[in-house]
Amino acid sequence: MRNISDQEIIDSVRKGNDSDYSIIVNRYKNKAFSMLKRMLKNEFDAEEVLQDCFLKAYNSLSAFKGEAKFSTWFYRIVYNTALTKMSSQKRRTESEMTSIEDHFNLESKYRSDEIERKDVNQLIRDTISKLPERYSAIITMFYLNEMSIEEISDVMGISISNVKVMLHRSRNSLRDLIMTSRFAEELL
Amino acid sequence: MIQITDEILNKYLDGELSREETEQVKSALRNSEKLQRKFNALKLVHEKLYHLKEDEVSPAFTDSLMKQIVRRKFSVPKQQKYFIFSIATFITLLCLVIFGFSISAIISSAPSSIGDSNSVFDSIPNLSDGLVEILKHLFSGAGLSIIGSIFSIVILISGYFFFEMQKRSKADLGNGQHL
């Protein structure tokens, strides 16, 4: 079966076929949920915000001109709604408020024996959630949602070089954590 | 010779270095076990991140969302409800005022006692004359200013609700388009 493009689905929804919107929902719900869960650090909030995002997107479909990809436009809604949620809950951590120049130490977020007990996949998965919100959002968009640096920069409203710096910083932190774990021995 | 920093290693991993720089990094990696270990760890992270699995929303998510969309589609927005309510209230009040004036006109122009008239219908031409007089009075001079003021207030209220609706839809668009 032919893979229907986002634009075709949107055109159909605009013509009044509301049920077609469920194709869009099914296409993006898990990816957006993964991003929200890592940003909000809470599964329940993530699902609630996701629902809000899909409703916002539906209500604003007429404003979507197709100049950018639908995914970029939609993730921008997701990212901004998550930021609004975080600021309304006053849950922005200090690390989130710091500039990208600041260093964050992920090792300190684990108990000494905790790193040793996890396998490498689990360690990386858990650690992404421990990154400051914007960093975990970048990691999710880049690796899981397979978005380009340019698209991420568009979604987050920051420069391409800042996205790169934040991506590299996240990777370096994860690398440092791996290097202190038992997996370090297997690296050569 | 470039200095092999974390930034350079990341760029090397992403294939963002020039051919000359790439060769220099390759040579540095061959000559330093520590650097090689660092790069391997970075590469491992990079590869593992590509195999991240999606988290899944609850199974009923799409159904519940679609139901909400249908429900919202057929429900009148709050501001629109207020707008319709205020207009309906104004029209009702206006009708009541006109009705009140008519009744008072009927009472004042009616014969002092029913016995003075042969029939109630005999007084109808007098009543309509009275009503016309009252309406004339209402739409001239001070009466007209009062009605004008009431209409202005209604227009202002409508304008407020219209502005609120515009503001809200702009904010919704802002979330998707500009922020």
Image (cartoon, coloured by chain):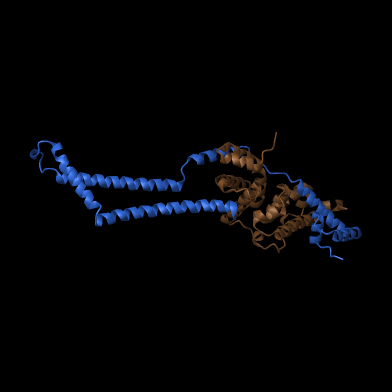
Chain colours: A brown, B blue
x%, y% of residue A160?
70, 58
Total residue callouts: 0
x%, y% of residue A182?
82, 52
* Closest to the observer, B130 or B69: B130
Q: Residue at x 58, y 36 (%)?
A: A19
Name the residue furthest left: B116
Name the residue furthest top: A1
Name the image quarter holding the N terminus of chain B. bottom right
Residue B104 in view (yes/no): no
Q: Quadrant of residue B121?
A: top left
x%, y% of residue A114?
75, 51
Q: Quadrant of residue A134?
A: bottom right
Q: Residue at x 62, y 40 (%)?
A: A9
x%, y% of residue B92?
32, 45
Name the image quarter holding the C terminus of chain B. bottom right
Residue B167 in view (yes/no): yes
Indicate whether A42 appears above or below A19.
Answer: below
Q: Is residue B59 left or right of residue B94?
A: right
Q: Residue at x 33, y 46 (%)?
A: B91
* Closest to the observer, B29 or A93: B29
Q: Is residue B2 left or right of residue A54?
A: right
